[in-house]
Amino acid sequence: MRETGIAVVGGGPAGLCAAITASRLGAQVCLIDDNDRLGGQLIKQTHKFFGDKSHYCGTRGIDIASILFQELESTSTRVIPGTSVVGLYPGHVLGLADRSRFSKLACKSLIVATGAAENNLLFPGNDLPGVYGAGAVQTLMNVHGVRPGRRVLMVGSGNIGLIVSYQLVQAEIQVAAVVEALPNISGYHVHAAKLARLGVPILTSHTIKTALGHESVTGAVICKVDKNFGPVPRTERQLKLDTICLAVGLTPLAEILWQAGCQMAYVPELGGHVAWHDEKMQTNQKGIYVAGDVSGIEEASTAMLEGRVAGAHAFEQLRGSNTQSRRIIEQARTELRAIRQGPFSRRVVCGKNKLVEMAGK
Amino acid sequence: MPKKTFSRNQNRITEHPILEFERKKRIRFFFQGRPLYGYEGETIAAALVANGIRVFRHTEKLNRPRGFFCAVGKCSSCLMQVDGQPNTMVCIEPLRPGVRVEPQQGRGKLP
């Protein structure tokens, strides 16, 4: 059986940073990802990251991925791409499955950075071809250079909905409208303003009622909703379009953590069930760490910092702390605190605080 | 399935303000026996959508059409018969020269 010091599951922003950090400090690291290409969602993010407190502000996600790939290559991390972690056995043994074979990997510490999956939304016709998750639209457009359709309805005005709408317009695809069930736009004002300047209507207190079409989407019915998100009678409008894009939030991909017996908690502010974790990003299972969206839906910049914290602590647990590891942790924590001071982080901070309170009980 | 003439690769983005798409080697593959073209390095699903194909399978009980949905091999919406192999997630399956792709009916047929 293969063995490693630290196994990192997931090669997105959190996992990449965790692997780079732990490996640079001197740990033996193995990074597993189910995709053939590492980078997670970064490889489809063409927008510039912002927030002046962030390390990568002003840099596009795709370019951050390139920087992290270079950093990773300069370390001795062993990368296992195209492979899913399908189970966790007692004694920190991971079951790995690639397209043709099953194998095992034993590790001393485990960093789970599996990210999140997109939420679906209930409405008639939500299974029709032409209804896509926002991440899928980004993959098609920004990785493969393929248009998902000609005219799109975006459901959800969080940052993902707004950013992907803008990217659709960049790819010369019409955005018929963005609908948002809440009475206000949920994402950053900058993104909404860019869309408004392009003439894309953002309809708050609106939702999709039905997708139309037999073999694939040919239209959508939208309507107004009241305070309780119920449809307002006689406000239906029919839109002609061929694509419906869902950007209605994410749920942490926490299967391995459940299987590991980690203490899980349902925290709506963090997107669903997350593993309880401390400031070291360690779960209640010694030697099992979390980082990024799986520890609570947030954003790539915080995922990278959490990855650094988890990577350095996993190293310290195996090899003891040193000046360098302490400095990395200190710096990453300071940056995390700074980023989370913004008004959009209130929800996440509230969610993370709930986890801390649980520890006291 | 209704007969339809496919205009080839009509959904390719050719000009983009930020991205450049490096389309390396053109690959010929087959959808329902008809030759189509895609590019090396992309998935079967991307090549199908690029060629205007949206219906990937029909479900077993209600015969509902299904297509591309999550793009990350998580949702099982895109299961197709690939070189006879049913239940292949084409959203993460790399396109290979000469590969034969068929829509899947229900659970598909075992080779």
Image: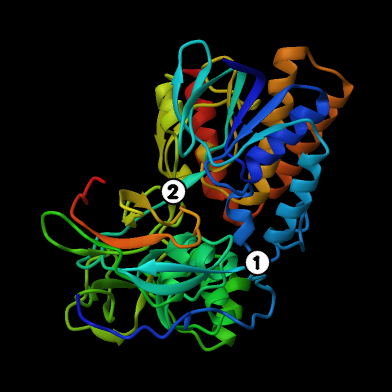
Q: Which residue is mark 1?
A: A46
| Helix, strand or loop at mark 2 | strand
Q: Quadrant of residue B58?
A: bottom left
Mark 1 and mark 2 residues within 8 Å of each other at the beta carbon: no
Q: Quadrant of residue A4?
A: top right
Please report the residue visible at 51 percent of the width from the left and 67 percent of the height from the top: A140
Please state the chain letter of the residue tagged with numbered disc 2 in the rendered image. A
Side of A211 where B62 appears, left or right: left
Q: A198 and B28: which one is in front?
A: B28
Q: B4 and B35: which one is in front?
A: B35
* Residue farthest toward the left in the current orientation of the protein: B61
How far is disc 1 from disc 2 in space, using C-alphas? 20 Å
Is residue A287 depicted above or below A73 in this figure?
Answer: above
Is residue B65 depicted above or below A232 in this figure?
Answer: above
| Helix, strand or loop at mark 1 | loop
Q: Which residue is mark 2?
A: A117
Crowdedness of circle 1 by 10 Å Cα count: few (<14), some, many (20+)? many
- Mark 1 residue type: Thr
* Residue farthest toward the right in the current orientation of the protein: A323
Please report the residue visible at 48 percent of the width from the left and 80 percent of the height from the top: B9
Side of B85 where B64 appears, left or right: left
Image quadrant containing the N terminus of chain B: bottom left
Is residue A121 depicted above or below A253 in this figure?
Answer: below
Provide residue B21's location: percent of width, then percent of height.
Answer: 65, 72
* Residue farthest toward the top in the current orientation of the protein: A91
Label at residue A105: none
